[in-house]
Image (cartoon, coloured by chain):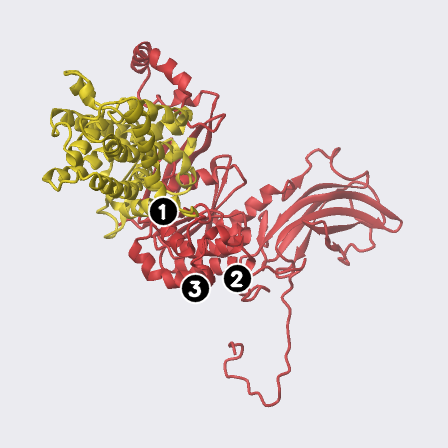
Chain colours: A yellow, B red
Amino acid sequence: MVGAQPDAASPPRLPTTVIEPSRGWVPLHLGELWEYREVLYYLVWRDIKVRYRQTAIGALWAVIQPLTTMVVFSVFLGGLAKVPSDGTPYPLFAFAALVPWAFFANGLTQSANSLVASGHLITKVYFPRLLVPLARVLSGLPDIGLSFLVLVALVGWYGELRLTASLLWLPLLALLALLTAFGVGLWLSALNVQYRDVQHAVPFLIQIWMFATPIVYPSSLLPEPWRTVYGLNPMVGVVEGFRWALLGSGRPPGPPLVVSSIAALVLLGSGAFFFRRVERTFADVV
Amino acid sequence: MNDSAIQVDNIGKRYRLGASRAPGTIMLREAIAHLAGAPFRKLREAGRRLRSAPGTGSATPARRPDHVWALRNVSFTVPRGQILGIIGPNGAGKSTLLKILSRITEPTEGRVELHGRVGSLLEVGTGFHPELTGFENIYLSGALLGMRKAEIDRNLDEIVAFAEIEKFMDTPVKHYSSGMYVRLAFAVAAHLEPEILIVDEVLAVGDVSFQRKCLNKMEDVSQHGRTILFVSHNMQAITRLCERAILISHGGLQQDGPASETAGTYLFQSSSTPAERSWSDPMVAPGDDVVRLRSVRIRDEAGAGVESIDIRRLFGVELVFEVCGDAPSLVPSLTFHNESGTCVFLTQDLDPAWRGRPRPRGTFTSVAWIPGNLLSEGLLLISVSIGTPDPLKNHVYTRDAVALHIVDSFAPDSARGDWDGPLPGVIRPLLKWTTEAPDSWIAPKPAGANS
């Protein structure tokens, strides 16, 4: 839609903006995203500030959600159903997966709904629309940070805490979860502008996705070569990686993580281009 | 060398009717059906493209009846530093134009070039979040409107002072009164420093004194060479702030010229009475077998027909009537009513040449001259009558025959003086005042200088 480039004909430092109808696929304009980084910062900051305002326990909610899920899983699946957990205590096994999963699931839900929820902004002011779903995913970072601290405390309480180089993988795995949530969020948020069906489908999608990810069970239950195919789900790589890095269970990141990363990047790239393509109608439709 | 800030070239915007859907958007069901038929459609389209000449492609969707052009063929150029007023009735396409210029929505056709940073104020409190405090919202809204953090930091004290709500800056804005909210919102907006500022009707809210403060601030801003596009229904604000205005109606650019003229045209169109009327068929013209009215019009000193006139200028109401019978005497008269129906005054032709005397048959043209600096601004409806006083008989009476807009150009040599707020009254004469000063006071040398 728009290209902002300095124009040699006009006086120095006056950027020229050309507004023309666009057709088909349009470039991502990553440079423009960088130019608007302060807007991104304030959108994230706003989401974080507002999320737990006027709540009694505030950010504790970020911890309570995965924690109670872990307790429920441990009692029913670990305790009663005796689901295997690769030799680690089931609560640790579940919580190590639920921390990145909650970050992913919340990021996905939030970003899928982000454009519709920001309709008042989209129809009143210009900024790169890609920032809207991105801000929503990024604003989940303090939550995962907080629940990660609880995870570390829990691991320590079980006496399983080991300071090894494998811990360095954790930020990368969180990044993979973030990129996946953002990639899917791009697709869903753009679709949601036109088809509100999406917001009804998202809780569903997350539920199914959760069972397609080894959260309550170990992926060792699956035979090869299916485990590599299974890695097409980027969250498989994330969850397996978290368990390996923190608990030393399972195998170190290998081909499945590569497959997961590629899948995440494909989701992200295609999502971004699809988003840019339909972006031009957002203000008219939302 | 290019000295324009904005160049708008033939832009148009087409919307799809129903459910406010833009072209290209479809229901999921339709989308699936669309996908299923894709292979065949591609073939058909390819065939069509081969048959039709290049450039005619856009004509195909335009014929579709479920599309409507909200804006079409609009072109104008705004030189750097100008304040351009944009006026027009609701639904004429003003908002669509602003949305295109602020890059919120894309045009369907045409091209716009903007030279400089653009800031747009299409609503009060863009990005404000009710849960955030005054300070927090300054940063959030400022960033969304295009300010850098450093700029906001630098202007923070000034913004807070402008909003006049220092005490409440740490309170969430959801607890603000609407007046406080608007003040804070405009304080942020007023400190935007883009080269091009696009302002929708945001001044329609807030109390009068704050509105004036905002108008003054906008004037300051334009003094610094900034270009402003300003949409308003308030013609006073338009004529005061803008030297030039464009009138948008039915999605097109209807008029582009000096603000007072464009505002006059707009005001005139929003009233249904014309400024000029004539009756070519004598049988339907108002009147009887003695005299018939042939035409009425408003004219300026030079004789040109006008629809609006500067408050300081003289204008005439010209009657052309045909005497076709005998009467002891004929006295044309005019009655002026304002918009609220108040009778402002009545005037009659007392020219001794015809007073109390019969007139020969034939066509007469009479002009009543109304001096400048007499009436206040607004719409005037003029009724025409021609009668015989003795024996009393009214031959012609046409209520609200023509209308005229008196436009206040906010010039200091009008009765407005240096005051720029609203002025009451149906007339606004420029009167002579005399003053008896205390004896001890010695007049300064240049008479008329401000004390």
| Relative image position of residue B235 (x, y in whole percent) | 54, 51
| Relative image position of residue A235 (x, y in whole percent) | 23, 28
Question: Few, some or many C-alpha atoms within 10 Å of disc 3 (few <14, some 14-19, many ≥20)?
Answer: few
Which residue is disc 2 drawn over? B411
Q: Secondary structure at mark 1?
A: helix
Q: Nearer the viewer, residue B278 or B164?
A: B164
Residue placed at 28% from the left, 45% from the top? A36
* Callout 3–callout 2 Cβ contact below 8 Å: no
Q: Is A59 placed above or below B14 here?
A: below
Q: Secondary structure at mark 3?
A: helix
Q: Secondary structure at mark 2?
A: loop
Q: Earlier in the sequence, mark 3 or mark 2?
A: 3
* Whole-number angstrom distance, CA of label 2 to CA of label 1: 47 Å
| Residue type, label 1 | Arg
Residue placed at 62% from the left, 89% from the top? B439
Question: Few, some or many C-alpha atoms within 10 Å of disc 1 (few <14, some 14-19, many ≥20)?
Answer: many
* Callout 2–callout 1 Cβ contact below 8 Å: no
| Residue type, label 3 | Ala
Q: Nearer the viewer, mark 3 or mark 2?
A: 3
- With B387 as the anchor, is B340 left or right in this view? left
* Whole-number angstrom distance, CA of label 3 to CA of label 2: 30 Å
Which residue is disc 1 drawn over? A46
Residue A132 can be seen, yes or no? yes
Which residue is disc 3 drawn over? B161
| Residue type, label 2 | Ala
Residue placed at 21% from the left, 33% from the top? A176
Q: Do badges 3 and 1 share one subunit?
A: no
* Whole-number angstrom distance, CA of label 3 to CA of label 1: 24 Å
